[in-house]
Amino acid sequence: MSRSTPTGMSRRHFMSHLTGASAMTMPALAMGNTLLANADDLKRRRKSAILLWMGGGPSTMDIWDLKPGAPTGGPFRPIATSGDAQISEHMPLMAKQMHNMAIIRSMSTREADHGRGRYYMHTGYVPNPNIEHPSYGAVLSHQLNHQRPELEIPPFVTVGGGSVGPGFLGMAWAPFSVNSNGQVRNLQMGLEDQRLYQRMYALDLIESGFINQRRGSAASDHQKILKKTLNLMTSSQMDSFKVASEPEDVKERYGNTNFGRGCLMARRLVEQGVPFIEVGLGGWDNHNNIHATLRDTKLPELDQAMSALTEDLEQRGLLEDTAIIWMGEFSRTPRINGNAGRDHWARSWSVVVGGGGMNGGIAVGETNSDGTRVETEPYTSQDVMASVCKALGISLQTTFTSQNGRPMKIANSGKVIKELFS
Amino acid sequence: MILSKQIGFVGMKRQLRTFAVLGLLAQMLSIPGHIEAQTEASDYGIQEVAEINRLIRQGWSDYEIRPSTAAPDGEWVRRLYLDILGRVPSVDELREFTKDRSPEKRKALVTKLLYDEEYTEQYANNWTTIWTNVLIGRSGGTERDSLINRPGMQKYLRDSLARNKYYNEMVLELVTATGSNTPGTENFNGAVNFMTMKLEEKAAQATAKTSRIFLGLQVQCTQCHNHPFNEWKQQKFWEMNAFFRQTRALRRFETGTRNVSHVELVNESFQGEGLTKNPDKADIYYELRNGITKVAYPVFVDGQTINPSGYVEDVVRRNELGKLMMESRYLDKMLANRMWAHFMGYGFTKPIDDMGPHNPATHPELLDYLGQQIRKKNFDLKQLISWIALSESYALSSRSNSSNESLDDPLLGETPKFSRFYMRQMRAEELYESLITATRALEGRGSYEEQEKLKSRWLGQFVVAFGNDEGEETTSFNGTIPQALMLFNGDLVKKATSSEKGSFLSDLASSELNNTQKINHLFEAAFARKPSMNEVKVANQLLLARKGDLTAALQDIWWAVLNSNEFILNH
């Protein structure tokens, strides 16, 4: 037959064929990419971010901004930390790491529904039926990916949680979702390489034929995902998901919990060069019996894993280039309800950030004596995102163009929180 | 090295060349079918179809859009099977339809899928899956100690849908149900499973989900405060909530043990929440943001009140709610919007279950009309399905033209104008059933319950929970890497592409068909079309690479076909 017979095609040749065929500009297609020669230099400068996502909306006045003595302050006492700010007595390990972290205590937002709040805190935009905004993970990995040409695995990984998708940036920037044991399903085809590539060749032909029929972006997005999938299947970098291979004492330090393993995986992925990792910890929607739940389960799990992650990153010299963001979709009412719980509350609450060169050991802003109001300049999701961008060296002038041609500034024109950088 | 092997298979090559030519010929022969599909849209003598076409066309002329051409038979029949039965058509079903030359054949097929006994079970199973996911989510009842019995929910839906129970009757039953949640126990009534897990925290979820799913009213935010964007006030949430406060989900134990046998949903007299209990006027209380406490009694969203007594002997509040819902125009509009979105890919509002003045519909007149008509027809789901499935919009190609490419792409932020078919991913369940139809991957699967168990285990890998009390969840079966990996390497696809004796591919390989027919069969099974010239060519190349091992080559082609965008997308 013709010379285009797939028989005997090399992997390199095969991949370049695919790349040429679809005229796409996807940095993640990094196989053999040596365009950016000085890899060591890049490695030194490369920035990452870890989002610790607290699904359900944690009560920050029981964790980071206590109101002892206030009628609705709850039973928890504040303790001193290695920084200037006090935190809950049930976060003793984090107390030793607070010199690395800043508490933003004057968060004031408007979305107190789970879905809307999750969207807003992940994107900096309120939901809009006509457009899907890209989440933090999609935006930051999109911006930082060029720093790691050698990366073969997805640049946006989410562990044990739902996250929010890539919106108008396209499925190529969708989160790669894994569970905390790091076992990625269906990785092995059990087929010799050559036959796999021949199959891929046939597949690419069918895909391209369909794409050329003007049926819209869903068809071409699919092809991009196929390429990412093939990259991942054949990459030794997948080992970075294997938390089980860590030494026992390290695993113990992070805690034998899903969140602990997720945080440990996050550190391994940062080391591998993944620019954005989201680790989810759910169970904060405490409408009932909140304080016993926090004291006995949620806070110990959080405290151990978050402190181990912070300390580990610091000890390995990674914290300087890795921003940590701790937040949920909103917080909980200062008032304690009839079921000894707290309901949804977005008007005055806290987010915690650290690393990436941001100032640690401080509390930014404050709430009033019973936590129902912010007393200082209020901050929003956009402001947190703008600050994280600054920490990661991403210009706030960066503008995306949504698919309908509307320009969208990164972080939705949020302002940098000055205290984090002075 | 390769060359020498090629020389060894000269005979094979010759045979393949013939086969390529035959493939071309077959393509040319299929052309008349395409031309026929381009003719003007018919309303099949159905008044509702004509009205849908008229109102949709009006939108096109308002926006000066030229609609896409009509989809060829194969594409139309594929989407119809997917949307009505939840699977792609088999090759036999496809061919029976395409060779039919009668002008009313599309109407005949819709009627057949909806009313022919042969399809009753598949119809009921597909819509049971859809409604189960709406009512209790993909994970409802899959956790240990759950108050939901998933098989119980499914049994209720299956029985109802197989008999084509009117939709309003189903809603009434779901909202007012009492009895046991588990099949085989006393007083079994599977409908209770909609509500058994939604009664915690003063039945907040029962309130929110009932309003949202059946009336398209999103009241969940107003539990704690007045809604910032729509007209619903906090008072409304609690007035709606008051209808659910006689309802209890009770665990029943096996006699003499602490093992839960089932959960029973009951109505019990409600004393009210006030300090002085006054069941004749059973009140509930809620708190405003400023700390002021307010009282609420059952009042429907339109302001109608009922007897405020908490005694079930006086009034069963959920029964009253059910009656009020039956009369609400939101009930029929929500149904029309949901079914339209199911077939068209987008509803008249986004999200479909958030209706009201704050979120205007794209085609308000059509939405209103469809709601009114389906109410006139006693909420007969199958009639509504027929109207939509036979509409001009549903029969349009998913290919865009220069006039609607950017003006009618909801992915670009445009409101849907339905001037073309919007492509969407198959749902995970549709992929599963399609693979089974195409390959008999799980032949001899056992009873419905056993099949459901297998399927739900497989589906479990794609369910991601958000970790809040509202049981929100999402799916990783959304066109991302985990899904691609599953299709590349997962067990289900391994089975579907197996070459073992007795498998689909080994039977196909050893069948009487010639090679052309074999390749055609694979493309028709997956895409409802014949292969292109280039596709035939690559099939030949693969046969060569497999050194003439036909089964192995078919395996490679089949794998590529199943992994393609054209297969996973409903187009």
Image (tube, coloured by chain):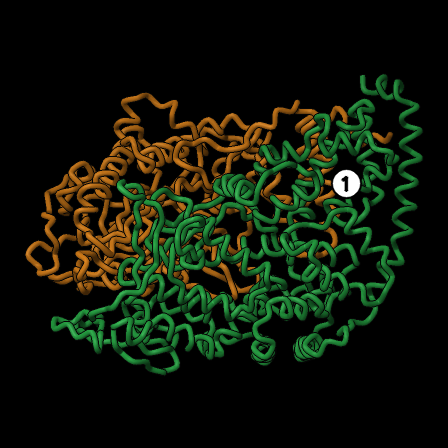
Chain colours: A orange, B green
Foreground of the two, B445 or B397: B445
Foreground of the two, B375 or B348: B375
Q: Position of residue A255 (x, y in %)?
A: 27, 31
Q: Which residue is mark 1?
A: B522
Residue B518 quadrant: top right
User: What residue is drawn where x is 44% and y is 46%?
Assistant: B464
Q: Is residue B281 above or below residue B547?
A: below
User: What residue is drawn where x is 20% and y is 70%?
Assistant: B271
| Pointer 1 local density, CA inside 10 Å: few below 14, some 14–19, many at least 20 | many
Label 1: chain letter = B
Report the number of discs.
1
Q: Quadrant of the C terminus of chain B?
A: bottom right
Q: Quadrant of the N terminus of chain B?
A: top right
Residue B291 is at least partly visible in this image: yes
> In the visual, does B25 lie left or right of A286?
right
Residue A121 is at least partly visible in this image: no
Q: Secondary structure at mark 1?
A: helix
Foreground of the two, B409 or B99: B99
Q: Position of residue A370 (x, y in %)?
A: 13, 62
Q: Check disc 1 and give the amino acid type.
A: Leu
Q: Is residue A139 above or below residue A409?
A: above
Q: Position of residue B349 (x, y in %)?
A: 52, 70
Q: Is residue B197 above or below residue B315?
A: above
User: What residue is drawn where x is 59% and y is 81%?
Assistant: B365
Foreground of the two, B125 or A165: B125
> In the visual, does B313 lie left or right of B111?
left
User: What residue is drawn where x is 9% and y is 48%?
Assistant: A77
